[in-house]
Amino acid sequence: MAPHVCEICQTARAQILRPKNHARICAPCFISTFEAEVAETIMSTELFQPGEKVAIGASGGKDSTVLASVLKTLNDRHDWKLDLVLLSIDEGITGYRDHSLEAVKRHSAAYDLPLKIVSYQELYGWSMDQVVAQIGKKGNCTYCGVFRRQALDRGAAMLGVGHVVTGHNADDVAETVLMNLLRGDLPRLSRATNILTHTPSAAKATADSCSQEVSFTDVKRSKPLMYAYEKEIVLYAHHKKLDYFSTECIYSPEAFRGSARTLIKNLERIRPESILDVVRSGIDMAKLVPGGDINCQGSCSSNKKQTVAANADNEEEAEGGCGSSNGKESGGEMAQMELKLQQDELAETSGMETEIKLPAKVTQAANKSDLSQNTASTGMSSIPIRTKQTKSLGKPERNVAPPKQKLGQCERCGYLSSQAICKACVLLEGLNKARPRTGIEVGGNPG
Amino acid sequence: MPARRADSRAALSRTLDANLCKRCQGNPPDITVRGELLCKECFFRYVSTKVVKRMESFRVRNSQPGAERTLLLPISLGSCSLSLLHCLNSQLVRQNERTGRPGFKLHVLHVSDTESTAHLDKVKALFPDHVYSVIPLSDVSQLHYVTSIFSDQDRPTDLSGLLESLKSATSRTDISQILLRKLIVHFAQSHGCEAILWGDSTTRLAERTLAETAKGRGSSLPWIMTDGRSFQGITFYYPMRDLLTKETLSYLSLLQPPLIDLVVKDEVKPAVSTKNATIDDLMRQYFRGIERDFPSIVANVVRTASKLDSSLLDHAEAHCELCDMPLDGQSPENSRICYGCIRTLP
């Protein structure tokens, strides 16, 4: 059989079978098509304003490396006049993050983009290695996720940047859609399918955007690669000879995500287009989420008000690079959910909840799970915090019928939070309290 | 049922004998149902309660004597639809015993292209009190409003020609299912049936949720999942929606006499080659595992999909001419079919 000729330029030999639609094309045509498609996504959604300062959340992995490379190329080519910077988070995981940060430093030099590294150590006083030493290997993903979400926003604010772009690709989004169907989280499904998410204060800030000050509570997030296939990102990196760091975080992905990931890979094998079809379905479903408002992009809290309490708390957790936002040991996560659902069902059938009306019941169940989650994650030092939590949670639940959540600011750090104290501060309090306490308990134990 | 509630509360406070059925504490258990060991009788009651609860609108007191409403029960002869037929038949028998008249009438429909009716004849013999019809799927070619879509696309309008013209196994299954549903709806409407009782179990509905999502038909989910008026203008009910597929299989095996041999095995071949695998096969296999290990998660998927608010698309004026779903921004300008159907008819 004669070698195939590129379907696009009709001259060069086709080297690439495009994962997205199985078109046979040559490498240069692939590169330019890939870039054109990302540009099309950005322009059709009017993602950036001319001259906007944009921070690229850079982990050193393939997605963010390709994102940085493509944005740099497109910015020059289309004269978007974007002010691009690289923003990296140093979680303080020895043997993982220190290596990938080296890659980011090389990118900074290669693309001539300024780089800012924000460490957990400087923001919170705790590196992930220290957190793991304190609480053990189980459950630390919660800390990492909660800390990361804030860290990106805080880092962006330090740079005076109001817009962070992340490297989430189509596979990630499709995975999140299926994962949230499996675990029944429609608000998150809706948020994951929005290319741009922002907070209400961000919406306000655009009105008087002349002010240079950027608060860490109004940073926009967007995913310019959300229609790009993971396989094509790898191909792009390969043919552009990009240097990236390819090691996953040492923690395995949570069970739901793992299950969804396998499913997406199998779907892709049966019908390659189905990844984008899942994304498309997710976008369509987001419009049907009760209480959702398409205009405010799904993530803003006025829209979120009607979602149940459990989500409000989770909101502060990362959509994160490592994909682990729930601090359960990986295999147990689905089993735990199964157990909880079974208990709910049992309670319902044996009539133990007959007095409670449906919306209230949802809040209560959600709060219950919240509390147990907090207890689990803060471990032994949780008692004083838990009482506080119960109070703040208890009030809205009692007097309002639909469980509305108001997004306010954390009393301590000022970060956006649906609770009086944001999740990061709660986690930190636990960590900080446990420090002296451990010492005392060790001393007291022998007796 | 306050009596049962009191029972179970009392049962909770008593110490349970783990060697006996958890509900009645009278018989040795025969089966584990969602973590509870139950005897046959209690399991049958569990199944029938779940179905009867979904059939509230068709109680005797809601029916006019002599003018009972006719409901269409399409059966594939799979375990779900057979269990449903058995449950509804028993419900009708009970209604007759108690009040002397039924709350509804059943018209059983089997769509099959095979000549042999041996299987269905056995079913008929077991449940003789209902009206039965058998029609071939190829009858769909006689529905002009269906075939015009294909002829406009220069495709064959006869069923086998049409299916052959489709490239992938997924597309063929997808189109067959859409046509099957259209044919059943048409049959119901032209035979004076007030509603259609679909046999889908929780597991089937969960499979469909993810399969439709993967086919780009996410916006159709709220209509597929919920009891009520459908876009085809007829009311849909899903009486089996609270039962798992594996529970229907156990039900048919434990019945006296067992009906499990009547089940026409749907060939779920393990995906040896992915070339011929379909998205529906993949989801069926996936949920077979989830159903075994995490049955409540299966139900959670269905519950989640049902939460999507279909009224948000009520304003849509145009509907896909193939699958009947609203075309609200779902397809390119001037297209008569939706995104999912465009995908499946490349």
Image (cartoon, rainbow, N blue to C red):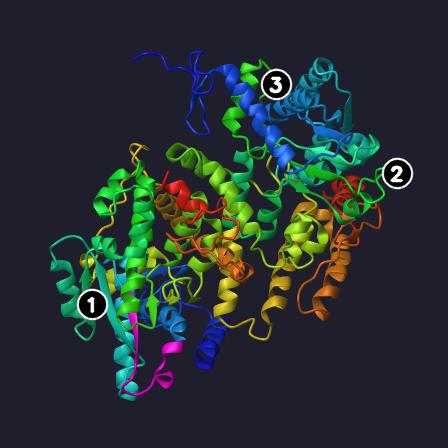
Q: Which mark is residue A244?
A: 3
Find out whether the residues at labels 2 and 1 contact each other: C-beta distance under 8 Å: no
Specify the subunit that label 1 lies on: B
First-in-chain label (2 vs 3): 2
Q: Amino acid at mark 1?
A: Gln
Residue depicted at x 54% and y 71%: A352
Residue A255 appears in the rendering: no
CA gap, disc 1 and disc 3: 65 Å
- In which quarter of the view is residue A393 placed? bottom right
User: Residue B28: horizontal and vertical position, in percent?
Assistant: 31, 66
CA gap, disc 2 and disc 3: 36 Å
Q: Residue A105, relative to residue A186: is it above or below?
A: above
Residue depicted at x 64% and y 33%: A42
Q: Which mark is residue A271?
A: none
Q: Are marks 1 and 3 on the same chain?
A: no
Q: Amino acid at mark 2?
A: Ser
User: Residue B346: horizontal and vertical position, in percent?
Assistant: 37, 38
The residue pinned by badge 1 equals B256
User: Residue A337: horizontal and vertical position, in percent?
Assistant: 53, 51
Specify the subunit that label 3 lies on: A
Q: Are marks 2 and 1 on the same chain?
A: no
Circle 2 or circle 3, nearest the eye: 2
Q: Are marks 2 and 3 on the same chain?
A: yes
CA gap, disc 2 and disc 1: 79 Å
- In which quarter of the view is residue A329 placed? top right
Q: Amino acid at mark 3?
A: Tyr
Find out whether the residues at labels 1 and 3 contact each other: C-beta distance under 8 Å: no
Disc 3 crowd rating (10 Å Cα; few below 14, some 14-19, many 20+) is many
